[in-house]
Amino acid sequence: MVTKGLVWKMQDYIDRCKKVVHKLIKKVEGNLFLISLISLLWFLFRTARKPSRIAYPCQQAALAQFSSYFLSFFPLACLRRLSHPFKKEHLNRYAVARFLGLLLLSFLVVSTGSMIYDQMNDYKDDQKLGEHVKHPPHGAGSTGSSSLFYMTADAAQVPEHKVVSVYDPDATNWDYTHGYHWEYVNQEVVNSMVAKGVLALTGETNTVDAWKALIPYQPGENVALKLNFNNSWDCNETDNDIDPIPETVNAIIDGLASIGVPEDNIWIFDASRIIPDRFIDGIDHSGVRFYSAISWHTCKGNYHHTSYVDANSPETSRLTCTQGNLPQDVIRPAQVLVDADHLINIPILKSHGPYVTLALKNHYGSVEYALNDRGSMHAYFEAGGNSANCPLETSHVLADISNNPNIRDKTRLIIGDGLYGNAYENWKGTRRWRIFDDDDPNILFFSTDPIAASSVMTDYIMEERGWQDHYMLHAGAHLGLGIHEHWDSFQNKEYTAIDYVEIDLNDEIIAGDVTGDGLVDMQDVRACVSHILGMRDWGMAADVNGDGAVDVLDVQRIIDILS
């Protein structure tokens, strides 16, 4: 039985604890040195075990707390707070012990709370990666999340899992009433979008170096550009069905020309379709070549025929689906791919009905097969119609195509064309998008990772229309072709493994305001100079004159604005 005396003693003990905690809080609140020291200890303790935790808000706050004290107060505080109490004539062992006890207790309180917070973040990260951890690449030798970053043994290199998108609503201005959508594209705006995209993707300060970083071109080599003319069946085709537009390709050709690629060594192709005259007329460079495997049509310009390699050619590869109802088939790439040294994949931001048709599906027409025609091959991958009974998350013909060495090892860049788009259909016209304020998307995507680029583009499509089959991305990640994951939300667009960078050229920018403080002054001149000297990266804000390079001309432009 609990007596009143015992209750009073318990209440008295609780009151004492409250007083001790209250005093502790008061001492900690008024002691910047103690708070900063605890913050530093905790930051080092947590990030040393897992460096990625540096990105967590509580770790950033701890570092900021210590940094602000160290830079602002430490030089003054160390003279009085540290030296005086610990001088020999003032040494008080009890005070020192109390100080160390207070430090330890504070550290335990902060560490417990922060550890709980970090564990919650770790759990969220594991949940986000859970979908992809179960699909490690072949031969990786690991089933943990780190295996996501491995490639197959014979791959050329580990791809950079960075995706950049550049948005500018001024890129197109079709009213959906007059003429054709491809007649209403602003070439200058598209040029700027492509320039900013390759700069952001590579981190270079001028477009020539950016293109050199992406395309390691040597004299005599050939660069192939894979486009998607799925709705083009005639040289005289003029309609509003969604197909490639020349302005994006013109900007890419300009970039290739800037690093010394001759026009005759730039090959635009879609082997299974016809490249129409209206597209060829829109290309500013008359020397580039156009390739198609359809021999009964020869459109205007520098038009060439390509074939598919023989089934016994060493350039072929096999499908990974071996337990299905259909025999294991052989993938025969187009000869134009075999002869190319570098490949740029240019998919369109669109759906193919039940599934997305992005970087991997873009190569469906780049190959033929030994045992089946292209139409029959749909049985290998269409969900719900998968008569071959292939395990689509690991054995998908669209992933197998991109794993052919002529595609996998030669792909240097993916540029997803979302100037126009259709989130619902592949064979009809462009549509306005709800998520782009009921306008055309006016967006381009840049990456060296075909899976990561397709993952980001898929998230945009699914945000617009809802779920889309994208098993080919799972299978591509399984083969080690790149990283697949989904963003946390349309509002945040945050990924765990993909480094996604958004550039919105619609944001109002004050010309010359390099520092972004809303003013144009000598601070901006100094910032621009520091960018040129490599002392600090101010990004594209330092490109004041908008020519794609940061140099003395930008400094001169700021001085002109000031004068």
Image: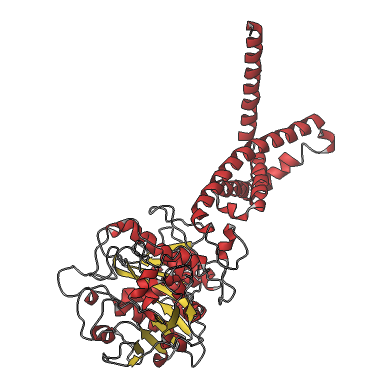
Residue 300 showing in the rendered view? yes
Q: Residue at x 39, y 76 (%)?
A: 363
Give the residue displayed 55% in from the left and 53% down from the top: 55
* Of the pair 58 and 122, the residue shown nearer to us: 122
On the picture, is 453 further left or further right than 278? right
Query: In x, y percent, where is residue 508?
Result: 34, 61
In the image, residue 39 above or below residue 176: above
What colour scheme does the image use?
secondary structure
Q: Which residue is farthest left?
A: 178
Q: How many marks?
A: 0
Q: Quadrant of the N terminus?
A: top right
Residue sitting farthest toward the front: 325
Residue lying farthest to the right in this orientation: 88
Vertical placement of residue 453 versus 82, above or below: below
Q: Tell me which corner region of the image, top left, top right, bottom left or bottom right, holds residue 152.
A: bottom right
Out of 15 and 373, give the one closest to the viewer.
373
Q: At 41% across and 75% down in the image, what residue appears?
A: 195
Q: Quadrant of the C terminus?
A: bottom left
Which of 121 and 232 lies nearest the eye of the viewer? Answer: 232
How far across and down, in percent of the image, does residue 56 sit? 55, 50
Image location of residue 159, percent across then percent down? 53, 71
Q: Residue at x 59, y 60 (%)?
A: 146
Q: Residue 225's spot in the image, x, y percent?
A: 39, 82
Q: Quadrant of residue 105?
A: top right
Asked whether residue 560 appears in the rendered view, the answer is no
The answer to whether residue 42 is left or right of residue 272 is: right
